[in-house]
Image (tube, rainbow, N blue to C red):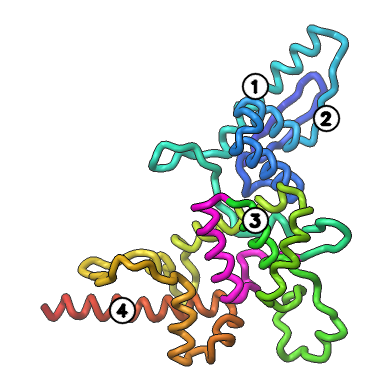
Amino acid sequence: MQHTIEIPELGKTLYMPSELSECDSRQYIAMCELITKRNSGIISDDDFRVMAVYKLLNLKPVESSNIISEQHKLSNIYLIAELIDSFFEVNESGQKIIKQFYIHNPVPKITPLWKTYYGPSDGFSNLTFGEYVDVLRLFLDFGVSGSLELLYDIVAILYREKQNFHFIRKRLNNYKGDCRISYNSNKVVKRSKAMQKAPVGSVYGVYLLFASFQKYLTTAKLPWGGQEIDLSILFTSASGEQSGSSNTPGLGMDSLVFSLAESGAFGAYSDVRNTGLWEILIRMYDLRKRDLDTIAQAKKNG
């Protein structure tokens, strides 16, 4: 819930977001830039809070020649700055981390230089499974290495040019409402170079958006046929279930692409990658539900 800030001297009431999910696009990108500076040690926590107040309220710092007036203004700013702590929560390890409770896209487009690239729709509803798998791999790699190049690659996968709408008219039967050109992994490198010219707040904002979406998937509950399906079963092990896996590293979601291609449920390998993310997730839920039903029946039969 947004913070309400009263300024009696000016007779004004201002409203300030209490977390990233409440920010509009301008506020979100500005906050993400400040978060990167804070995380990298370029600015201190105190500087981060003060600068965040100015960005969120769209204020410009103006010095007053009146010392008492200037001190009063700074006192108010520092008082408001304490509210910025609401953007964070403490995790199980005791670390202060940014709150992530949103799946709408606050960065709908990015314009690094003269060309505009468009991102995925809210909830990644127009994402293909291939896009998701490729981004997830880079997302996990970034968590280990912290390489900025990986963030540019992530943005280059998700953000693409608009389709030629004259071309769209020729294939309306296959058009699914995505204004972006089709995903081609061979063209990521070229776009990644362009994304290096994009504002750092936009680039890191896309990373945080995907992180928030990943967090959402582990607890997502979706209405389906008059009931609710719980996607968390895709990320948890059932009681009595044994992994039986070795210590050899696996391929993660990439392995699932191969498995689905082998089963032929969605066609060949390229067909699986071009299938919508949510279509695959629902299929995964169905398969997982069957596994859990089998385990439950086995336990019941002793």
Mark yes or no: residue 228 visible.
no
Residue at image mark 2 = 60
Task: Tell me the crowding category of disc 3: few under 14, some 14 to 19, or many 20 or more residues within 10 angstroms, Cα based.
Answer: some
User: Disc 1 marks which amino acid?
Assistant: Leu
Q: How many marks?
A: 4
Can you tell which mark lies on residue 291? Answer: 4
What whole-number distance in Å separates the C-alpha atoms at marks 2 and 4? 58 Å
Q: Residue furthest left?
A: 302
Q: At 49% from the left edge and 53% from the top edge, which residue is drawn?
A: 144
Mark 1 → mark 3, Cα distance in angstroms:
38 Å
Q: Quadrant of residue 119?
A: bottom right
Foreground disc of the pair 2, 3: 3
In which quarter of the view is residue 112 placed? bottom right
Question: Of the residues under marks 2 and 3, which one precedes in the sequence?
Answer: 2
Residue 199 on image: x %, y %: 76, 49
| Label of residue 79 in the image | 1
Separation (CA) of disc 3 from disc 4: 39 Å
Amino acid marked by disc 3: Glu
Q: Which residue is mark 3?
A: 149
- Please identify the quadrant where the N terminus is shown: top right
Q: Amino acid at mark 2?
A: Lys
Between 172 and 110, the one lying in front of the other is 110
Q: Would residue 124 be counted in the magenta stretch? A: yes
Secondary structure under badge 3?
helix
Residues packed near mark 1 inside 10 Å, few (<14), some (14 to 19) or many (20 plus): few
Q: Residue at x 55, y 84 (%)?
A: 272
Please give left or right for residue 34 compared with residue 254 in the image.
right
- Nearer the observer: mark 2 or 1; the answer is 2
Left or right: 64 as drawn, with respect to 158: right
In the rendered view, tell whether residue 153 sits above or below residue 19. below
Q: Is residue 271 above or below residue 188?
A: below
